[in-house]
């Protein structure tokens, strides 16, 4: 089997971990740029996109 980030990274092992990893990375990037976006808003947006 081809080893890719999606199947070798422990943070992609289930949907909840993947969501948390993506939300945390986007939140961190937004904070660096001075955005006032909250984690709650990002989680809601993620669920809208992936539902």
Image (cartoon, rainbow, N blue to C red):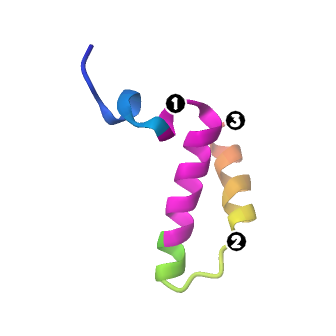
Identify the element where label 1 is drawn.
loop
Magenta-colored segment: predominant secondary structure: helix
Labels 1, 2: front one? 1
Identify the element where label 2 is drawn.
loop
> Upstream in the sequence, badge 3 or badge 1?
1
Q: Position of residue 34 (x, y in %)?
A: 53, 86
Q: Position of residue 10 (x, y in %)?
A: 46, 36
Residue at the extreme front of the image, as rendered: 10
Q: Quadrant of the C terminus?
A: top right
What is the spatial separation of the Cα atoms under label 3 and label 1, in whole angstroms?
19 Å
**Residue of label 3:** 51
Q: Quadrant of residue 44?
A: bottom right
- As for residue 16 lying within the magenta part, the answer is yes
> Upstream in the sequence, badge 1 or badge 2?
1
Nearest the eye: 36 or 3: 3
What residue do we see at 72% from left, 63% from top? 41
**Residue of label 1:** 13
Nearest the eye: 40 or 51: 40
Give the magenta part as a residue range.
Answer: 11-28
Q: Position of residue 17 (x, y in %)?
A: 59, 41
**Residue of label 2:** 38
Q: Position of residue 37 (x, y in %)?
A: 66, 74
What residue do we see at 63% from left, 44% from top? 49
């Amino acid at each position: 089997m081809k080893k890719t980030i999606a199947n070798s990274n422990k943070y992609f092992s289930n949907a909840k971990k993947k969501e948390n990893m993506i939300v945390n990375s986007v939140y961190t990037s937004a904070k660096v740029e001075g955005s006032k976006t909250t984690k709650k808003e990002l989680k809601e947006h993620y669920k809208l996109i992936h539902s």
